[in-house]
Amino acid sequence: MDTAAKPIVTTTSMSFLLHGLAFAGLLLVYGQTTKLEEGVGRGVEIQLISSVLVSDQQETDVPRKQQAKTEALSEAISDAEQKMTAENSLTASVSRQTVAEPVDRDAVGQNIAEQKYIIQQKQLSVFESAADTVRSTNASQPQHTILELLHRRISDNKEYPYLARRQRREGVATVAFVLHPNGKIENTQLVTSSRAAALDRAALSAVKHIEPFTAAQDYLDHAEMFQVDIEFDLL
Amino acid sequence: MNKFLSLGVAVATSGIALPVYSEIEQAVTEIPAIVVSAARTKQSTLTTPASITVITRKQIEDSGSKHIVEVLRGQGGVQINDLYGDGSRATVDMRGFGDTASSNTLVLIDGRRLNNSDIGSPDLNSIALEDVERIEVVQGSAGVLFGDQAVGGVINIITRQPGALRHSLRLSAGSYNRVSLHAMTSQALNNGINYRVSLDLRDSDNYRDHNESSYLNGFAKLGYDYSNGSVFAELQYIDDELNTPGALFADEVAANRKQVNPSFATDFSNAETTVGRIGLVQELSSNWSFEGELTNRETDGLFRISFAGSPPATENFTQDRKVREFTPRFIGFIPAWNNTMLTLGGDAVESDYKLSTSFGDQFNDQSQRSVYLQAVVPVKNMLDVTAGVRHASVDNDLRDAGMFAIYPNGVQIEDDVTVGTLGLAIKANDSWRVLVRADQNYRFAKVDEFLQPAYTPAFTPIKLKTQQGLSLETGVEWAQGSNTAKLIIYQLDLENEIVFDPVNFANINLDDTERRGLIASGYWKATQRLGYSVSYTFTDAEVTSGVSSGKDIPLVAEHSALLSTDYSISEAWQVFAEIIAKSDRVFAGDFDNELASLPGYGVVNIKAEYNIKDFTFSGRVNNVLDKQYSDIGQLGFDPNASFAAAEAFYPSPEINFLLTAAWNFR
């Protein structure tokens, strides 16, 4: 086999230059590593805003069983609420406004979301300092937060599998799982397949990888089932 | 919207029974949906460490181009040589090959090789631009991944994937009685079945006299996606008819640059091609998958070719080729090795070529076999090392007949070659990427190249050697949002480069040749509405040993550049303009560099587009400044000057326009 093309392999001055440059480039960039995020969480903010607003509108839809539980906790919560600042009334007014004028939602959405986030954080700290009894999924405000946290954590673990991307597979996988207060994730399962096994696996894996979800102890007093749509989309 | 937080969605409604936990409610809380997106249009899935320029669907649409050649013209590192200015017989040249560009730049459509085992150029029109999702320009050799003819670079054309139901219809009309129609329908059904059917018709008299063209391209693809893979079958039929006016000497150009020399007045080149292809993608495990395609391509060519100074030929010749390809590969990840990605594949290409002319017949069969292995090793978070090797063998079975036959009893010519690659890709952060690589490449002599004997001594067969080379290159790429910039410098050294020497009328192996160059390109989105694209290519291609040492490789422009701008005046109106420039070149075939040089040129093309609902109306004017230039010139023998070597030109079109109306329904 007369293969290696001898005269060509001879290193020329040009190739020294090339490699020198490359090495310099390597040295230059080596220090400043920045962690890359896989994929882009398109529309995440918008969806969060939606979820906050929609939840306000839908509080009346909470099933009776949970409503009862909420009522049972209401005393403790109202104790906590008394300690809140006047800003909280803004939440109520904003919510009411949103319900009354749903058309304006988008226009005020961003501001509302920001304000509500701040308020939620404050409420949260108030709740925590007030009493342990406040820990409940079914108190609506903390639930927003656990949903946000879950959304964020799953997003951090999401990945478009290379082989699926290469084969141009797209789809939506719906995954359900049980989250325990101790942060354990159990019974992760596929509710609806994306029609591509590789995407289904990636969706399940994104959920499984949030374990241990230690923040659960702040929000749950018993195991609860969650469900999430994970959409794989080639832009 | 209300799905995001609807408490108490009954488990039963999801249709799947979930186990009941006694301590929890049978309620499911929905987490806001998560979108995992991958930029299909921006990222290549090719695993070469080469610099890859991706021309997106959007960029193609913005340019108002009507065929692939127009899109590629002026791209960094790409030189288009367009014989008749309509793209019908254009070749793509990467890294400066000139005449033999079509044997040294590999063109792929969805991974299928368009290059031939004979010197016929790949048919760049065989895919309608409307059916293209993106075009990837791979800079430099990719000998390990793609093998034969991937010397200067690879043009990888990716077709659009069926999605939601979509129909499109385009009608164009313009200068030189040009009319064209493109119709397409595609859909991916929920049950996994998907299809795309398209028809492309073109008719034009073209700029030159006796240059009428007629092109029909029908395509149908049926696919089925299942959980662990997908299968597809596609069928294509192409009927390509073109009258060929040939070249003109300087005095003829001066008299009438559109004319056809009377000798060539009946020449033509027609071809009918059918392509059938089936493919399979099968997931073997969570880390491994198999991909493979089986392709059958048959072309029946009918042509007539005359010689300057002789009366027009009266006899038709035939050129038939059958190509069968099998391209299986396994792709997988090895978690234990830091998620190293392996590609293990084999290519088998069988070509039967038959040429029938008044000189006699040629029956040439070629069989190529290769195996390759490439590994992409993530050494650090930011550093990928790519290493690979390919072993390829070729077996030519050649026979010719007639009074000039050199292998009347047939001959078998075999060779084999091993090439390797080593590359580093350093992704410093979201914006910066640095590439360094060495890639060996090869091109086997084409079947018909063997059959051009030397005339001194008379009819001695020339046993061509396999051309081999090494490409060394480094590049820096930057991207932030829509803005991109890249700089590549390279050196490509070849030995036994195979060229046609028109002075001695034989295919020869050149002594050592060397190409050095620089490619700089960038896109700047100045505002939401205004974007600029720029590229500059410097190519120094010369013979570095032997009798022609120091001479420039013909037809390669030392400098070429592109500047284009797209501007959205409003939602509906969009305009585009580009300047494409090429410097002087040596005439094709003039390895001694003895003729004057073919003058460089700069042309300006503009386009305006108006969108309303599902309709798009556009107008494109090419060569707005009405420059008279020739994109290609070759060394010819002037019968009016006792067959002395002289400059012969293929005059390019003057100012011309094309109006288009398109309807897109989805």
Image (tube, grey):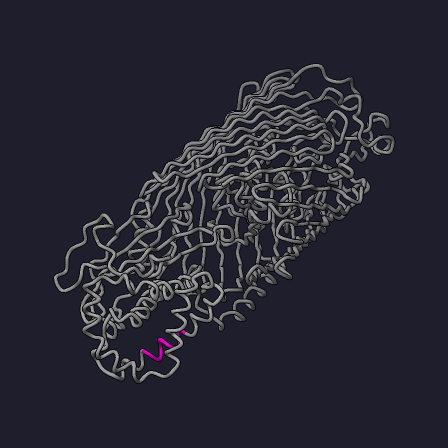
Q: Relative to B531, does residue A78 appear above or below in the rendering?
A: below
Q: What secondary structure is the magenta-colored segment mainly?
A: helix
Q: Viewer-proximal residue, A174 or B643? A: A174
Residue A122 magenta: yes
Residue B200: quadrant of the picture: top right
Q: Decide if residue B198 is on the left or right side of residue B516.
A: left
**Chain part drawn in magenta:** A116-123
Q: Tell me where residue B473 appears, x and y as whole percent.
A: 57, 56
Compared across the picture, whether A163 is left or right of B259 comes to left
Height in image: A151 above or below B285? below
Residue at 69% of width from left, 37% of height from top? B659
Farthest front residue? A100
Residue B470 visible in this rendered orientation of the protein? no
The vertical placement of B207 against B431, above or below, is above
Left or right: A220, with A126 as reference point: left
Nearer to us in this view, A81 or A3: A81
Q: Nearer the viewer, residue B466 or B488?
A: B488
Instruction: Name which residue lies at 66% across and 45% down.
Output: B609
State the image coordinates of residue B276 (x, y, percent, origin top left): 46, 28
Which of these two is toward me, B302 or B277? Answer: B277
Which quarter of the figure has residue B2? bottom left
Q: Position of residue B187 (x, y in %)?
A: 44, 37
User: Which picture quadrant has residue B337?
Assistant: bottom left
